[in-house]
Amino acid sequence: MPGLWQSGVSATATDGLTTVPSQFGAKDTVSRLEAEIRGRGMTVFAHIDHAAGAAQVGLALRPTELLIFGSAKGGTPLTQSKQTAGIDLPLKALVWEDADGKTWLSYNEPGWVASRHDLDPDTGRTADVLAASLREIVKRATTAAP
């Protein structure tokens, strides 16, 4: 996705799912992400550790943690436009480790949510603002300060 990061870190986007590499391990990335979210006045509604759940039933899973987060101020306009948008809100971010030990962060693009639910153009602009904020949150969670 050209221009996503000014620092040269690349991201991939497929069908509304953006995935970026992290310079940190999974636990540190999740901690940084949560701090960024809370630092912007947003609420973390849930923190799901899929690997811990797998371990509880005797299964192995590399680090895989999901944060569900957002704010009523940002998300409600999308749901007001089309209530079905509520299936994709609040926002979600998945931090996961691949087979090579590399940590990644994946999230649904707010613009994809707007498109999926055929939101009106004014609401689409709200999704653009959410997307810019989300990109900054993810960038700060996955990259070291210059």
Image (cartoon, grey):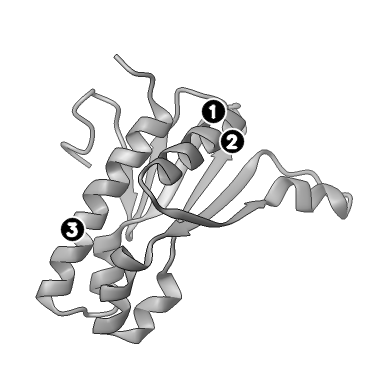
**Circle 3 is placed at which residue position?**
128
User: In 3D space, how far apart are the residues under numbered discs 2 and 1 (Cα atoms)?
Assistant: 5 Å
Residue 62 on image: x %, y %: 68, 39
Mark 1, residues whose alpha carbon is within 10 Å: few (<14), some, or many (≥20)? some
User: What amino acid does circle 1 point to?
Assistant: Lys
Say which mark, if any, is on residue 24. Answer: none
User: In 3D space, how far apart are the residues under numbered discs 3 and 2 (Cα atoms)?
Assistant: 28 Å
Give me the residue at 54% from left, 28% from top: 102
User: What amino acid does circle 3 point to?
Assistant: Asp
Q: Residue furthest bottom?
A: 83
Q: Quadrant of residue 19?
A: top left
| Image side of residue 57 versus residue 64, left or right | right
Q: Are marks 3 and 1 in contact (CB under 8 Å)?
A: no
Say which mark, if any, is on residue 97. Answer: 2
Q: Secondary structure at mark 1?
A: loop
Who is closer to the viewer here, 61 or 36?
A: 36
Q: Which of marks 2 and 3 precedes in the sequence?
A: 2
Q: Which of marks 1 and 2 precedes in the sequence?
A: 2
Screen quadrant of the N terminus: top left
Q: Are marks 2 and 1 in contact (CB under 8 Å)?
A: yes
**Circle 1 is placed at which residue position?**
102
Q: Secondary structure at mark 3?
A: helix
Image vertical order of residue 71 relative to residue 58, above or below: below
